[in-house]
Amino acid sequence: MRIRELEQPELQNDLVNLQNPFAETAQSQNNWDPMPETSGIAYGMLIDAFMVQAKSLGFFLNPRLFDPLLAGEIPSQLVNPALLNAICLWGAAFLNDSDLESTMLTCAVQAVSSGLANAHSAIMVLQTLQASLLLSQYFFHRARLLEARYHATCALSIVLGAEFHKIRSATAARTGLSEMTPAVTMLEEGERINAFWAVLAQNCCLSAIADPASGSSVSYDVVDVPWPLELEAYEIDSTLLPIQNCGTITKFLSNRVDQGRSTPALQAKSAILFERASLLCAQATDQTVFSAQHIGLNHSIESLKQAILATSNRTSGLSLAHTLAHAATLLLHQPFADRYDESRQCMLRSCRAIVEFGRSQDWTSAEYVDPVLGTIWSLAINVLVSEIARLKHRGSPASRNMLRQFNQAGVDVLSAMTSGAASSKMIEMQLAAAREHWQRVMAS
């Protein structure tokens, strides 16, 4: 589908005109953002392209939502414009249709901006929330961090305003001020639970990368919602969720055993630890000691690594979560590496794991590379550069052998970043800085 078809719909005979599912209310308010007109086939192509990567992008809704649409039914009766625009934006990006991508970006931003004002049902609120998260992911992917954080913050405001953090809370009754009606089915409740954790994880990663000293935007001690499950699990076994729950993140950071062993739970945990480690790293000074707080967080990180390794089904999402946990180790120990050999050794072990992760994938054929990897690989390059500088003027055979290993590791990481940069502007931006840092040390 080309942009000319969007601008001149009269040229097409098979276009589907999208209508507002809340026509009377929306028309009276006169602020419902219209969808661009396109063919049902084009929608199918865009949605299919998106759904291949949906889980990697934090998609928490039931994917069966799109089955009627793909069968040719009217889109606006199924999906609100904000969500459909955001999905088509990603679809256009994956199909490398830059003209359509530009059009869909404009439509998505406009639709999301008025999405809540026109969300007259719980599902429409949830879909607007999903659209905000997808826009945040898109802007992160395109290295537009201010906009990424803005939409992530909007999504966070929605989940907190809707009191998703208090789902199944044992410690406090919900205020009743939320306009969200209670979930009717386990699947609906599961979507809300998964929505909270997907939004929190995105905010944690963006905070750690863009403003680590600020810390989380959420007070972790108010989070009582259970850890998320795979979406299909909510329909299979209702007993997998606790009847009541409290202090979910607080207990996790206190190293108490919990039931958060699903892939989305482990992914959320890795993002939380990444954010916590980045905060402690940003706050550290030359006088900072490896305190009980650091010891506790280190224990949480190591326990998470072991939990991921013990998982039988190692998906790409879990591999990324494991790598993010190793990045948390690098951040946690970075202020102490020059003073404590134990911290330096911890960093080297995690650096090796990150390097091996980079070597294990064929990044040249990857349609989507998570932009957080740009930061993770940059951290690994920093460790390798420090070790090379430390060993460079030592003449022992062991030192020369280590130098060769570190040199090759750096080359491999930069190679992975180069491949990832082809699909991610964020990684491309970080590659330039990492390569300059690497070349400067190699030339010295």
Image: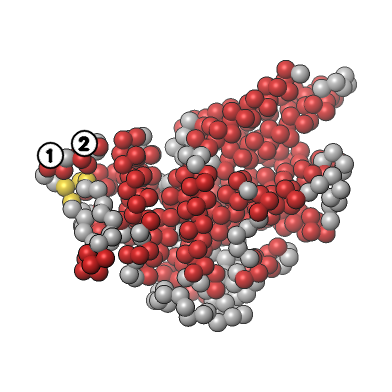
Q: Quadrant of residue 179?
A: bottom left
Crowding around mark 1 (Cα neighbors within 10 Å: few <14, some 14 to 19, many 20+) is few
- Return the x and y of residue 270 as percentages of the image width and height: 63, 53
Disc 2 marks which residue?
4
Please tell me the numbered disc located at residue 258.
none
Disc 1 marks which residue?
11
Q: Residue at x 20, y 40 (%)?
A: 7
> Which of marks 1 and 2 precedes in the sequence?
2
Q: Residue at x 36, y 60 (%)?
A: 115
- Return the x and y of residue 193 as percentages of the image width and height: 50, 67
Q: Residue at x 48, y 62 (%)?
A: 195
Q: Is residue 347 above or below residue 66?
A: above
- Inspect this view and state whether residue 215 appears: yes
Q: Nearer the viewer, residue 126 or 50?
A: 126
Q: Quadrant of residue 67?
A: bottom left
Cα distance between the residues tagged 2 and 1: 9 Å
Q: How is the image coloured?
A: secondary structure
Tell how many labels: 2
Q: Nearer the viewer, residue 203 or 211?
A: 211
Q: Secondary structure at mark 1?
A: helix
Left or right: 306 as drawn, with respect to 267: right
Left or right: 437 as drawn, with respect to 267: right
Kindly indicate whether the residue at mark 1 contacts the one at mark 2 (C-beta within 8 angstroms). Answer: yes
Q: The N terminus appears in which quarter of the rendering?
A: top left
What type is the residue that disc 2 sits on?
Arg
